[in-house]
Amino acid sequence: MRNLSPVARDSSWDVLAAQELDRDSWQRLLRHEIPAVVIRGFATPEECNRLVERAQVIGFQSYEKVVPPIDRIGVTVFEHNGSDVSGYFEKAKGFQALQGEIFAQSFSPVERLMSRLRQALGVPVQVAADPKHGTYCAGLIRRIENGTLLHIDFAPAEQPEWWVAQVQSQLAWNLYLELDPVSPGKTYVYDRAWTSADETLKVPGTYGYQRSVVEGAKKYTLKPTKGDVYIFNTRNFHEVDPSGGRRTTVTSAIGTLPDGRIVLWS
Ligand SMILES: O=C(O)CCC(=O)C(=O)O
Ligand SMILES: [Fe+2]
């Protein structure tokens, strides 16, 4: 499963800006040549508001053992790191029904995102499925309001026993549903991709890394805007600032398989 493909370091970002989604920008994002891809106007303000409203009625819960706290509706592989694969899939079933309910009463950002990717890239896009355990969850509704630690999200490194560890590249999409207009909680992505040697810089007992890991690296500032989707390569170190108020997103991981297929999971 594990696919710790080396990262080509002969190219680095030349523009610190997100590019519109197309085949070319996608390939460049996978090769770590650009910091982000954007889909502007992915959802209308009314769609965003409606989804937030439905999510609030259902209610958020906090990630287990994460400081600073992050709230979410959904199930994540991150919280089942190690080999608690069955635990994840047991919870997944319950969540899929709940997610269906929320999206049926608003709209499905996951379906929309998959169809936009198919359209733009011309490849199959599916929710990830483990042949033994079934379908992964994809599409977490998340509130990051106190910021995050400096981290990466990369299954080959973090969930080596899982089916999704066979991905060659891992990206994330975030649809920003609700933001504080003054202090939205910026996201910073560094031009520095994780390698296994970086594990020595992990801060013990947390999901974060020491700051020295990004020393001297170019930094892209993602200032989120409501209704837009940003996609970035989560093998690159990144972090989120605390926000002045509500900061709600819908998000999932996106992986590329060796046969060209794209899979989503949370
Ligand atoms: O909320 C964001 O802007 C990014 C959060 C994050 O760390 C991720 O999507 O991997
Ligand atoms: Fe992340």
Image (cartoon, helix red, strand yellow):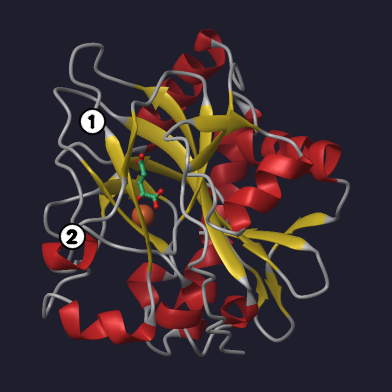
SS at mark 2 in the image? loop
For image coordinates 52% across by 72% down, the residue present is 7
Q: Which residue is mark 2?
A: 215
**Residue 56 percent coordinates (x, y):** 35, 29
| Label 1 beta carbon within 8 A of ligand 1 | yes
Give amino acid for label 2.
Answer: Glu
Q: Closer to the camera, 215 or 5?
A: 215
Quadrant of the image occupied by residue 219: top left
Please tell me the numbered disc located at residue 196: none
Quadrant of the image occupied by residue 24: top right
In the picture, measured across the screen, residue 158 lies left or right of residue 265, that is: left
In the picture, measured across the screen, residue 222 lies left or right of residue 183, that is: right
Q: Is residue 7 above or below residue 76?
A: below
Give amino acid for label 1.
Answer: Gly
For image coordinates 41% across by 21% down, the residue present is 53
Q: Closer to the camera, 206 or 81?
A: 206
In the picture, measured across the screen, residue 209 lies left or right of residue 103, that is: left
Q: Is residue 114 visible?
A: no
**Residue 220 percent coordinates (x, y):** 34, 39
Please tell me the numbered disc located at residue 185: 1
Q: Earlier in the sequence, mark 2 or mark 1?
A: 1
In the picture, measured across the screen, residue 26 lies left or right of residue 250, that is: right
Q: Is residue 56 above or below residue 66?
A: above
The local crowd at label 2, few if under 14, some if 14 to 19, many if 20 or more residues have their Cα within 10 Å, is: few
